[in-house]
Image (cartoon, rainbow, N blue to C red):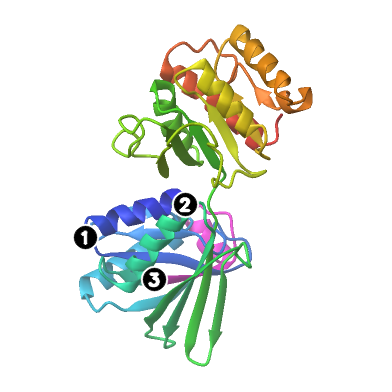
Amino acid sequence: MKAFVRSICELIGKNETFVMATVVESTGSTPRSSGAKMAVRGDGSILGTVGGGLVEAKACKDGRAMLASGDGMAALTFVDMTQELAANSDMICGGGLSVLLEVVEPTGPCATAYKEVDALLRQGHQVTLVSRFEGTSEIKAVEHQLVAGPVENETPVFVKKEGELHLSEPFVPPASLFIFGAGHVSLFTARTAAMIGFRTVVLDDRKDFANTTRFPEADEVVVLPSFAGCCDGLGVDENSFVIIVTRGHMHDRNVLAEVLRTKARYVGMIGSTKKRDKIYASLLEDGLTQKDIDRCHCPIGLTIGAQTPEEIAVSICGELIQVRSGEV
C-alpha cells in the first residue's frame, strides 16, 4: 500500500485529476478483498488493481465516464460475479463486489488527505483515513479526516446509514529498515529495499552523501551530528531492521554497540570475518555479552558471490526477505 500511496501522490504532484476506485464490500468468492484500490486516469491507464476482469473493466469504464462528465461526484457500483458471468470472463469466482468511485482533484480534500497519509507513512506512523459521503444513488464526498495513532482494525470498515456512507481505511507502514552509512552499497541497498516493501531510512553524518537527491526512493534521509547516540529517538523496535555500512571500521563498531542495545529484529554489518572478530572483541571488553553479539549477521547478506555494490545490495536484501518471512 505504501507504493500505491506514493504513486497517487505523484499523480497529485503532476496536477492530474483521476478516479479512486476502492473495493468496500465483497461477498462469496471474489478476486480481491475489501480495501483493494486502483486509480483510473483520464487516458484509461490504471495504477493498482481491484481484481481484474469484469470488476476492473467496469471500474475503468465508470471512472472514465465520471472524469469526462466533470461533475466531481462519487458513485457506488456493484459487480455481480455470478458463476455464469465468471465463466464468461474466465474468472473462477461467484460473489459480488461493491466498488466506491471518487473523483480526486489535485487541490481537493481527498488529495490533501493522501499527501498527509504519505508523509505519515514515511515517518513510520499508523493512520486511519475516515471518509464520509452523502446520498445513496448519487453521492458526494463530504469529509476526509485523518486519525493518527494505532489502527483499530487492520481491514477497512464500510458502513451505510441514514443516507450516508462511511469508510474507515487503515494505513500501516511496512517494517522500518535503518541503513547507517550513505556510501555506494547503501545507495543500491536503499533502492532495492524500497522496491521490496521496506520503509527505508538512510543515516549518515555527511550531508553531501545523506540527502534526498542521492536517495530519492528513501522514506527518510537523516544527517546525524555524529554516530554517537545514533539510535536515540529513532524508535528502533522489535519490528525494525538495521544495516551497518558506514565508511569506516570504527564507525561500524560504534553504531553496532548502539544498535545491539535496541530490540531490533535484524542487525547486519558489512565486513570481513577479520574485521568482525576485532569489533566483537572490542564490544565484549565494553560489557556486551556474547548473546548480544550473536544477534549480528556478519558478514552481511546471502552467500551468492556478490562483488559489486549492486550485487551486494541484492545479497543483503535477500537476507532481509529471508528474515522477514521467518525462514531463519
Which residue does the image show at 52% across and 16% down from the upper left? 249
| Badge 1 element | loop
In 3D space, how far apart are the residues under numbered discs 3 and 2 (Cα atoms)?
Answer: 29 Å
Which residue does the image show at 40% across and 80% down from the upper left? 143
Q: Earlier in the sequence, mark 1 or mark 3?
A: 1
Pointer 1 local density, CA inside 10 Å: few below 14, some 14–19, many at least 20: few
The x, y position of residue 324, in whole percent, is: 63, 37
Left or right of 270? Residue 263 is: right
Which residue does the image show at 37% across and 39% down from the upper left? 217
Q: Earlier in the sequence, mark 2 or mark 1?
A: 1
Left or right of 289? Residue 229 is: left
Residue 221 appears in the rendering: yes
Answer above or below: position of 2 versus 313.
Answer: below
Residue 44 appears in the rendering: no
Which one is in front in this view, the residue at disc 3 or the one at disc 2?
2
Pointer 3 local density, CA inside 10 Å: few below 14, some 14–19, many at least 20: many
In 3D space, how far apart are the residues under numbered discs 2 and 1 (Cα atoms)?
Answer: 24 Å
Which one is in front in this view, the residue at disc 2 or the one at disc 1?
2
Left or right of 114? Residue 244 is: right
> Please, what is the three-letter code of the amino acid marked with disc 1?
Asn
Which residue is labeled 3 in the image?
Answer: 101
Answer above or below: position of 280 versus 12.
Answer: above
Q: Earlier in the sequence, mark 3 or mark 2?
A: 3
Answer above or below: position of 64 versus 260.
Answer: below
> Please, what is the three-letter code of the amino acid marked with disc 3?
Leu
Which residue is labeled 1 in the image?
Answer: 15
